[in-house]
Image (spheres, helix red, strand yellow):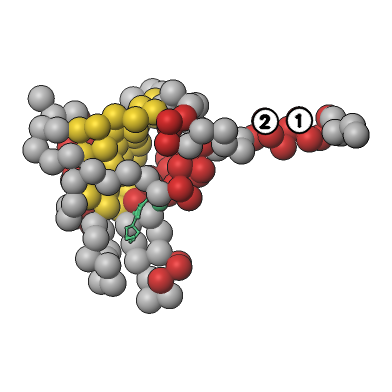
């Protein structure tokens, strides 16, 4: 059985705006209460302004008051085995624990699941800056 969240990520592919790369990406992020937010990539003529599917999904979720997540799925309409890029991994790490499952679409019924911690170990998180407020490194 295909993961329901993968199905949601695949559905989001239809809205992708990719006139420059032709590489569609869809993401589906599930909140702690089971709500699913999806995102697709939205490119821009100034290439570096392009929005990634994962950041669109998390922005939509946070804007709607959700800050706790328990699962992410990503899919590409072009190539199997897509994973979130480094920037998206860091964006996710702001709100998600290391054990967040990241389900990556390998096509048909097949997926590969990583944890966020596997994809981005030793990340900078909110606690990194929090500890800086209270302590100073001694020499
Ligand atoms: N892309 C995403 O949407 N998510 C990622 O994390 C990897 C890259 C998009 C951005 C661009 O529109 C296209 O894939 C090619 O890089
Ligand atoms: Zn990305």
The circle drawn on residue 127 is 2
- Left/right placement of residue 109 relative to residue 35 reads left
Q: Judging from the image, what secondary structure is the residue with disc 2 in?
A: helix
Rendered location of residue 50, percent (x, y) = 40, 64
Q: Residue placed farthest to the front in the image?
A: 139
Above-or-below relation of 102 to 17: above
Name the image quarter holding residue 103. top left
Residue at 18% across, 46% down: 80
Q: Is residue 115 visible in this depiction of the protein?
A: yes
The circle drawn on residue 96 is none
Residue at 44% across, 23% down: 99
Of the pair 109 and 94, the residue shown nearer to us = 109
Rendered location of residue 108, percent (x, y) = 9, 38
Of the pair 55 and 33, the residue shown nearer to us = 55
Residue at 61% across, 35% down: 125
Rendered location of residue 120, percent (x, y) = 48, 37
Residue at 43% across, 31% down: 118
Using a 10 Å C-alpha cutoff, classify the residue at mark 1 as few (fewer than 14 neighbours), some (14 to 19) or many (20 or more): few
Instruction: Find disc 1 in the rendering and name its residue.
Output: 131
- Left/right placement of residue 80 relative to residue 88 reads left
Quadrant where the N terminus sits is top left
Name the image quarter holding residue 15. bottom left
Of the pair 64 and 135, the residue shown nearer to us = 135
């Amino acid at each position: 059985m295909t993961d329901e969240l993968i199905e949601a990520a695949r559905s989001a592919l239809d809205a992708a705006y990719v006139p420059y790369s032709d590489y569609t990406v869809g993401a589906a992020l599930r909140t702690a209460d089971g709500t699913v937010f999806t995102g697709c990539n939205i490119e821009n003529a100034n290439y570096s302004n392009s929005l990634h599917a994962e950041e669109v999904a998390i922005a939509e979720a946070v804007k709607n008051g959700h800050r706790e997540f328990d699962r992410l799925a990503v899919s590409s309409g072009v190539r199997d085995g897509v994973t979130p890029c480094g920037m998206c991994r860091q964006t996710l790490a702001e709100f998600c624990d290391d054990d967040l499952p990241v389900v990556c679409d390998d096509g048909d019924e097949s997926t590969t699941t990583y944890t966020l911690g596997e994809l981005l170990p030793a990340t900078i998180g909110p606690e990194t800056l929090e500890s800086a407020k209270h302590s100073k490194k001694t020499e």
